[in-house]
Image: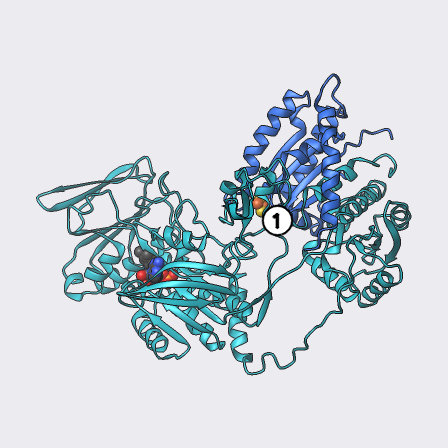
Chain colours: A blue, B cyan
Amino acid sequence: MSRFEPVIIGFLCNWCSYTGADLAGVARLQYPPNLRPIRVMCSGMVSPDLVMEAFLKGADGVMVMGCHPGECHYLEGNTKAAARARVITLVLDDIGINPDRFRLNWISSAEASVFAELVTEFTIRIQKLGPQQTRPQNSDTEPKHEMQNPKSGEKQRDLKNNVT
Amino acid sequence: MGQATAAAAGASRLLIKKRGTQVKKKGFPKERIIVGKTPTVGVFVCSCGVNISGTVDVDKVVEYAAQLPDVAYVENNLFSCSVDAQESIIQKIIDFKLNRVVIAACTPRTHERMFQETLRNARLNGFMVEMANIRNQNSWVHQKDGISATRKAKDQVRMAVAKVAHNYPLRQDRIHVVKKTLIVGGGVVGMVSALTLAGLGIESILVEQSEILGGNTLKLETCFKGQRVAPMLEDLIKRVNKDKRIRVLTQANLVYVAGSVGNFQGHLQVRSKEAFIEFGAAIMATGAKEAIPSEYLYGKLSNVMTQLSFDENVLYKNEKTNTIKCVAFIQCVGSREPERPYCSRICCIHSVRAAITLKKANSKIKVYILYRDMRTYGEWEEHYKTARDLGVVFIRYTVDHKPKVTEIAGQLTVKIKDPLLDIEVKIKPDYLILSSGVVANDNKKLADNFKFTTNEDGFFTGAHPKLKPVDLSIAGLFLAGICNYPKPLDESIEQAKAAAHRVFILLSQNEIKSEAIKAFITDQCDGCALCIDVCPFHALSIQMPDKTKSENRVRVLIDPALCQGCGICAATCHKDGIMVHGFTKPQLMAQVRAAINGMEESC
Ligand SMILES: Cc1cc2nc3c(=O)[nH]c(=O)nc-3n(C[C@H](O)[C@H](O)[C@H](O)COP(=O)(O)OP(=O)(O)OC[C@H]3O[C@@H](n4cnc5c(N)ncnc54)[C@H](O)[C@@H]3O)c2cc1C
Ligand code: FES
């Protein structure tokens, strides 16, 4: 591969941004193919753990997208997401990942073109920043984070066996 | 959307006799038990005609999917949503003993429900399917780069396979629907909603807090189209009172509400008595009110009036209009300023119409309208033209240079700088009318009771401004009229019909299924209660340990009727003590990891 093709994870809330992204398709708006969309019910559902996991596993950029302030389907999920975004930015800075690799955006279900523009802009930004160093050197973040995995593995099994 | 729904209400009314005569009930075979079985995933890659296959190399995606872990079967369909393909999917689920399915096609927002039914027809729980959106969010948006699009499609399939491996069966409870509506507010909107519902065979309880029905419309002389309002209102009130399907309660207040969509319970205070009611849905039609001005000598002089009191006391009284010489209106009083930033939409038209009425009653009256921006939108522009033709003088002002109002010996003087002539104009009106706009009623208690919120200005807002304009964010609750935002009568009535139709659709069912996407508590919960405060729906509470059972753990309890499945709680809990079905940490983590891992292999 000659061109740097960044891996960008996008968390899209079901009610506005995911719908806006679908509409971008209907309108055949073209944007770079680097975003890997993950549908969530609300931007307020995106735990900082998920964002951190993405970076620690090597994502080059992460976008969280929700409804405009005041338009969250669950009233205030997006304000919670905004508060978490500030924390995420601080933590990224702390562990040596450029906070510019993370972004929180508001996109309404009608704003297909805004969605396409933001994804384009963000992809270009990440391309300029270059690949993200997956494992921050001399940092104890990675081992700590690895320790959590067996635990969540257990939970996954629990859940699978969980008849509800 | 609102207009379309209102039209649907009209059409439904005409079809009411035939309604339900062609319905065939759908049944599903008994679910296979899959608990404890290792995931066997079937992947169905849709070409969507050429919508997907024109850009994405579908064969390569199929080939790639076949070697993913847990995948037992892969096929390509021309249209996965076609009847043939559905049958094929069902057959493959049976033949290959698939217990999970990935459909790589269009968007789950339109097709997930359909594929859930396909699975149910194949004796699988509907929640064992995940969709990879390789059309709307891939082939359609990367039309010029087939190679990248194919790579992305592989990634999306891998992510969906990784997620679905963590899916588990979910149940939806059946809720018996109480076929009765509560309508809060007996203005025109409440009454039209009740009558529309009655026409569709649905009973309602119309609760009005004042002594009489009618609301603001009681104070209106004509609607914007010019028809007189009183006969229409009298007719409405008569019909509402006569209809056996409408129970009218005046001087009534809702004090308490419990339950959820399909099955709410409430306590009413009706005068000195209490009443218990049950209802399946509710419409908020609580209206709003004219703002009380705090400027321009209002309250100090009796000839400085609001629009409605001028209408009532002067405008339609010939003995007064015969003697008046000069009238001035000031628009946007208290509106479109930092404390009240919105436009009330009706005041410009209302004043322009009042000016026309004055001129027609007595053409000698000098009429001035002092405005910031004239907003006689849409067809109402005609009124503005008419007013100009009749000689009404419009003078513009800006918020930094508001008109100055003084009074000497009972004579009002309004000074304003005319920006066109660039001179100060002095007006000596007999009456000064302040267009103060519309402010929300204080209905915080009502909103709290039902657990929805108001916007910053105190108005109720729809769940989605375009797609669900008359639904509140809580299932089973709807809104209409000026409790939503200020609007003229005709628009209010339209919304009333739309809300009634939304209720009709809901209450036409005998049973509804509760949502499955809801929060649940895991073994990791240690009762720290961090999640309780962040829940916007007050669905979480704390349960103290039951000492008699020698418990020592505080537990968080979820009220499934209130939980909407937003997952704010889940993202707040860093112990994974609470999660949302369908979007659990393991499911989302699996997607994140799959999005990154194997990126190289799939190139
Ligand atoms: C100043 C002003 C001028 C207007 N001019 C025009 C005009 O010229 N032409 C035009 O077409 N439209 C005009 N309108 C708009 C028109 O009045 C509205 O569109 C219409 O009245 C909306 O009716 P509604 O039923 O939504 O609200 P309302 O008429 O406000 O009725 C709401 C009812 O709910 C009751 N209520 C409130 N809270 C509760 C509660 N908690 N429990 C029980 N009952 C409750 C109230 O007592 C009231 O009876 C004007 C409005 C205002 C305020
Ligand atoms: S639903 Fe979109 S941000 Fe909450």
Residue B45, percent across and down?
83, 54
Quarter of the image with the C terminus of chain B is top right
- Label 1: which residue? B520
The residue at 16%/57% (across/down) is B324
Res A143 quadrant in image: top right
Determine the quadrant in which ligand 2 lies: top right
Instruction: Spot the residue most to the top.
Output: A138
Look at the picture and state if B306 lies above or below B228: above
Residue B302, percent across and down?
15, 51
Residue A74, percent across and down?
54, 48
* Residue B326 is at least partly visible in this image: yes
Asked whether, in this view, residue B551 is left or right of residue B87, the answer is left
Look at the picture and state if B21 lies above or below A7: below
Asked whether, in this view, residue B307 is left or right of residue A6, the answer is left
Task: Look at the numbered disc 1 and give the secondary structure of its residue.
Answer: strand
The one of A137 and B235 positioned closer to us in this rendering:
A137
Q: Chain of mark 1?
A: B
Look at the picture and state if B311 lies above or below B594: below
The one of B320 and B596 positioned closer to us in this rendering:
B596
* Residue B495 is at least partly visible in this image: no
The one of B353 and B91 positioned closer to us in this rendering:
B91
Res B49 quadrant in image: bottom right
- What's under tag 1, amino acid-wise? Phe
Crowding around mark 1 (Cα neighbors within 10 Å: few <14, some 14 to 19, many 20+) is some
Quarter of the image with the N terminus of chain B is bottom right
